[in-house]
Amino acid sequence: MFYDSSEFKVLEAGVQLTWMQQKLNTQNLANIETAGYKSKSLTFDGVLSSVRNKTDASEISRINASIVTSNTESKQPDGNNVDLETESISLYRAYAQYSVLLNQINTEFDKYSYVLNCNM
């Protein structure tokens, strides 16, 4: 079944990660005027490459990510390093990825629904 496949596990993890990225972007944008606030981002370097070669869903336990606080120099005098344009683009990119992943999951469910309904 699709629920137990490695493809579903990776899609599910991707949805969770892109949702987390959207939450971080909105948090950064909400704190754009907070003095001394440092922007945060999500990293999962090398995770997908290690998962890509696994074919058994039981081998894919969980895709972990880290929240990293940026130490880039602030452009603002109050020490806040949030850049409106960068955060907005990152938020939109995460939203687009999230939408594509959900669409892929829905497409798979539609295929199963079609097969189940045709045999009746």
Image (spheres, helix red, strand yellow):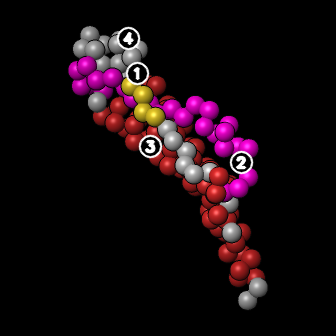
Front-most of 58 and 52? Answer: 58
Earlier residue among tags 3 and 2: 3
Residue 88 visible to an observer of this rendering: no
> Comparing marks 2 and 4, which lies closer to the viewer?
2
**Residue to which mark 4 is pinned:** 73
**Residue to which mark 3 is pinned:** 20
Instruction: Tell me the quarter of the image containing the N terminus.
Output: bottom right
In the image, which residues are magenta? 32-57
Is 75 located above or below residue 84 in the figure?
above
Toward the right, the furthest residue is 119
The residue under label 3 is which amino acid type? Met
Residue 91: x, y in percent? 47, 36
**Residue to which mark 2 is pinned:** 54
Could you classify mark 2 by the number of other residues whose Cα lies within 10 Å: few (under 14), some (14-19), or many (20 or more)? Answer: few
Asked if residue 34 lies left or right of residue 98, the reply is left
Is 98 located above or below residue 73 in the figure?
below
Determine which of the numbered discs, if any, sits on residue 70 in the image.
Answer: 1
**Location of residue 71 (image quadrant):** top left
Residue 92: x, y in percent? 50, 38
Residue 37 inside the magenta-drawn segment: yes
